[in-house]
Image (cartoon, helix red, strand yellow):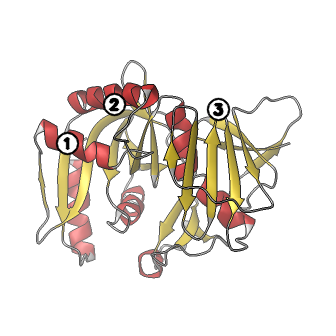
């Protein structure tokens, strides 16, 4: 049995990806299993308390069930490296949602034990911002899927050192980036392994919702707006016809909204090094 470590869990896989370290064990019981099927299956996206179907366009249909199993049905002869990479994104997030975790489409970094979350739509610059922060003394937590634990306080689970970047954004960072064979995504971003250390422990200090603007500025939304924005980035998407699992997550999300300060961070879409430096200085001021 091959095991990979991500989000503080050991996950069993049939064929381990080259972009993650694996271990072989016969006596460790994994917390979840990924099974890649040899046939396709057609289902609409669906969320219930015990089963979730999620379609990744052109890649796979994923069935997440019983809080510990992800079945992957490939589309279009997609290679296993690409299949596994995408399985460890939203489908893995759905599995943790089944375990009553808050899961956001967001990146996160940590410094001095305090973490910041950056939520936003695909292409808004979460990955590039994380790369710049890592280069400026922050520790990497996650690039796209943020799994949040609620214990005494709220904290983010560290994922794995993988990041998606455009060719332009990856330039001049060869010392910390190693390109994988995962196929480019719909936004033509390649997937890279980060040669860096990962965050070991953290407490969430703030949440930033990223947006484009004419100037660099940060401001606080009112409580109802920040809750609406959190719901926008919830994984899986919050359903009109909810079930008990999502109601529990909604209660935790409301508590997160009340406990952690949220801000909207606007940046110019055309960003040069000076703009990045100003953005990093602004973010550093919140720690």
Residue mark closest to the camera, 1 vs 2: 2
Residue at x 22%, y 62% (from the top left corner): 211
Secondary element under disc 3, as helix, strand or loop, is: loop
- Say whether residue 159 is visible: no
Disc 2: CA contacts within 10 A as few (<14), some (14-19) or many (>=20): some
Q: Which residue is mark 3?
A: 66
Q: Judge from the rendering whether residue 7 lies leftward or rightward of residue 18; answer left or right.
A: left
- Say whether residue 248 is visible: yes
Q: Judge from the rendering whether residue 107 lies leftward or rightward of residue 197; answer left or right.
A: left
Residue 86 horizontal/vertical position (percent): 59, 59
Secondary element under disc 2, as helix, strand or loop, is: helix
Gap between marks 1 and 3, in whole Å? 31 Å
Gap between marks 2 and 3, in whole Å? 20 Å
Q: Earlier in the sequence, mark 2 or mark 3?
A: 3
Q: Which disc is residue 250 wearing?
A: 2
Quarter of the image that includes the N terminus:
top right
Q: Earlier in the sequence, mark 1 or mark 3?
A: 3
Q: Judge from the rendering whether residue 204 lies leftward or rightward of residue 89; answer left or right.
A: left
Secondary element under disc 1, as helix, strand or loop, is: helix
Residue 43 horizontal/vertical position (percent): 60, 56
Q: Earlier in the sequence, mark 1 or mark 2?
A: 1
Q: Which disc is residue 226 wearing?
A: 1
Residue at x 74%, y 61% (from the top left corner): 18
- Kindly give the residue lying farthest to the top in the view shown: 152
Gap between marks 1 and 2, in whole Å? 13 Å
Disc 3: CA contacts within 10 A as few (<14), some (14-19) or many (>=20): some
């Amino acid at each position: 049995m091959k095991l990979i470590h991500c989000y503080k869990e050991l996950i069993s896989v049939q064929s381990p990806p080259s972009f993650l370290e694996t271990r072989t064990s016969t006596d460790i019981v994994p917390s979840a299993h990924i099974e890649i099927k040899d046939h396709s299956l057609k289902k609409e996206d669906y969320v219930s308390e015990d089963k979730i179907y999620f379609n990744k366009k052109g890649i796979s249909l994923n069935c997440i069930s019983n809080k510990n199993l992800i079945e992957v049905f490939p589309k279009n002869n997609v290679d296993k490296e690409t299949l596994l990479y995408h399985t460890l994104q939203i489908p893995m997030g759905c599995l943790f949602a089944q375990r009553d975790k808050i899961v956001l489409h967001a990146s996160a970094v940590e410094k001095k034990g305090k973490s910041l979350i950056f939520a936003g739509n695909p292409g808004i610059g979460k990955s590039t911002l994380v790369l710049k922060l890592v280069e400026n003394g922050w520790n990497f937590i996650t690039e796209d899927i943020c799994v949040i634990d609620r214990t005494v306080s709220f904290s983010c689970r560290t994922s794995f050192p993988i990041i998606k970047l455009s060719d332009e954004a990856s330039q001049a960072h060869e010392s910390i980036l190693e390109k994988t064979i995962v196929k480019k995504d719909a936004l033509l971003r390649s997937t890279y392994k980060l040669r860096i250390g990962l965050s070991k422990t953290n407490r969430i200090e703030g949440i930033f919702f990223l947006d484009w603007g004419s100037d660099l500025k940060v401001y606080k939304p009112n409580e109802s707006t920040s809750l609406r924005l959190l719901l926008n980035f919830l994984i899986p998407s919050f359903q009109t016809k909810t079930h008990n699992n999502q109601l529990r997550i909604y209660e935790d999300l409301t508590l997160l909204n009340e406990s952690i300060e949220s801000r909207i961070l606007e940046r110019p879409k055309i960003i040069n090094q000076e703009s990045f430096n100003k953005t990093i200085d602004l973010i550093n001021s919140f720690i």
